Amino acid sequence: MNLKNIISIVIRILKQFKNDKRTVALFFIVPLIILLLLGYMLLGQSTNLTLGLKNKDKGFLGKEFSNNLLHNKDINIKTENINQLKKDLLSNKIQGYIIFPSNFTNNFLINHTISPNIYLEGSQPQEVQNLLSNINKAYSIKGMKIKESIHYLYGNSKLNILDYFGPAFIGIIVFFLVFLITSVSFLRERSEGTLERLIASPLSKADIVFGYMIAFILLSFVQAVIVLLFSLYVLNMYNIGNILYILIIEFLLTISAVNTGIFLSMFSKTEFQAIQFIPLVIIPQVLLSGIIFTVNTEPPVLKTISNILPLTYAVQGLRIIMIKGKNLNSHTLLLDIIVLIIFSLLMLLGAFLTIKNTIDTN
Amino acid sequence: MNIIEVTNLTKTFSGINVIDDLSLSIKKGSIYGLLGPNGSGKTTLIRILLGILNYDKGEIFIIKKGMSSKETLKNIGYMPQQSSLYQDLTVFDNIKFFASIYNAEKNINFILDLVELDEIKNKKVSRLSGGMKQRCSLACALVHKPKLLFLDEPTVGVDPLLRAQFWSYFNEISKNNDTTIVVSSHVMDEAEHCDKLALIRFGKLIAEGSVSHLLEKTNSNNLENAFLKLSK
């Protein structure tokens, strides 16, 4: 080992790094952007959990617990009649509601037992836990027996964290791998000169873009089916939806990812530079598309960004299919699919522009 | 009859004229050499003629149909400077792919014989030597028996024996198929294989004619001296 040689290599690498402005920028600025995003999200998260409340109890206990709930700053409380609460739960305006029945105080006085009726939206285990723990805080009398009657609109008490994150991960795995592989393959087509050969042939731009798209869709579709079967039958992920709809969402996500890959390859000259796009394309989507944090609780600025990311719609779509069992009658699912189609078309246009740009700037 | 006519062609990159008011004409069935040092604009000119690059001024006619339309490109073959092959495909699969673009699958065996790659047709391109890759690249450019063939520095990095073999292929194609060949080179002694030459420097055409005409015009005994005299 020779110290002088090692120093020569160190200096050479640092000089190369200094001369590659894009790498310098990505290396030092991207971590700050990601941390800023994360910090803003965590600190700026608003408490959007709303619990509906109906106190039918004539005694003191229902009144006392209702007051406790109303004074809890961690959740919003909405008092309404039962029909309205049912409607609000269906439209996700509230995440659950609690009813103190008319014999609530009497039961307590006779049996030392309280039996509130709790109705939960149920699709998000974190929200369920959060609501139940806040409800528990309201039970201010020690030593009583609690016999809650809990009803779930979607899912059940066994719905676990994997069941909630699973659909989102199916989305991100498909998007990320397809984006990465297409981006690098297309870049290789450019850097190895074969794209130039194709442009000088009778092939049209459409032939090239659609050729790429169909090949990767075929590959990705096989991948999507494997991922889905593994998730459902090996990991036993919760699914009450139609597998066909899951595949439709994955299919649209694949088209978006292929064309995003082609489009972004325009901005890189080497595979190394293409890999640098990963933190920029993937991490904000992981943070903002509702995979980890729910979009509803994001600060308004980030919510706007979330609303233009394709993964937001894919994740939402996959969750409402798998956990809520929705089909095309659901306006939300229909909107998710329409947005994914629009995004796919926009990225398709981007891919065409990329090939045109390759011709113009070669 | 001319197969290519270029009139007052200009192409600018970042304010610099890389092709500067260049005019030339290429006769059908001839071997036409674009000769000039590295960076003189030969590759840029070929790319413009193929429609890979746009140009700023001038007029181009190729096979009497204006600048390379997709219809025209069916009759054109192109061998770029770098081998430009799919490294993880075999020789056969590379040639087959380009043949399929031109509906010329029936020519695959003929072309494998011509470039003498039949025995190694099932080898992956990434495992071939530089010379074999060049032969495979030529095969991909020739598989559809084009009327017009652009060869961008086809013999760069090729040993003298293979270079001689390449020129024998080019002559064979030119004679047997009546294919017009436009070949760029910075090696002056290769120019002797061409029917007509364009000497290019800084994107300008400094002289055009046969080898004997250029030597006579400059009173030189070799093309290198002729090029130096014309460059002054």
Image (spheres, coloured by chain):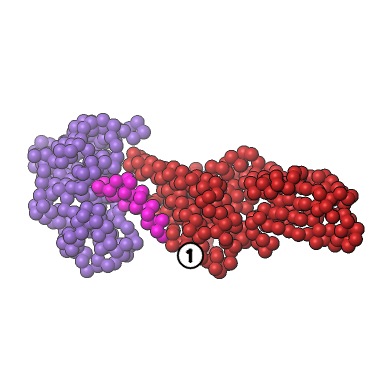
Q: Image height check: is A166 above or below A332?
A: below
* Residue A204 rendering spot, x and y as whole percentages: 29, 46
Which residue is at 51% across, 51% downward?
A: A328
* Residue B24 rendering spot, x and y as whole percentages: 16, 36
In the visual, does A146 lie left or right of B60? right
Q: Image height check: is B228 above or below A90?
A: above
Q: Residues within 10 Å of mark 1 (few under 14, many from 20)?
A: few
Tell me if residue B143 can be seen. no
* Residue A129 rendering spot, x and y as whole percentages: 72, 56
In the visual, does A322 lie left or right of B181? right
Towards the viewer: B204 or B217: B204
Tell me if residue A210 can be seen. yes
Q: Magenta stretch: residue A222 in it?
A: no
The amino acid at mark 1 is Ile
Q: Which of the 4 quarters of the picture holds residue B6? A: top left
Specify the quadrant that holds the C terminus of chain B: top left
Q: Image height check: is B171 above or below A222?
A: above
Residue stretch in magenta? A194-219
Badge 1: chain ID: A
Chain letter corresponding to the colour purple? B
Chain letter corresponding to the colour red? A
Which residue is at 44% across, 59% downward?
A: A221
Q: Magenta stretch: residue A216 in it?
A: yes
Q: Which residue is mark 1?
A: A226
What is the secondary structure assignment of the residue under circle 1?
A: helix
Specify the quadrant that holds the N terminus of chain B: top left
In the visual, does A293 lie left or right of A362? right
Q: Which of the 4 quarters of the picture holds residue B219? A: top left
Which residue is at 79% across, 56% downward?
A: A116
Towards the viewer: B183 or A258: A258
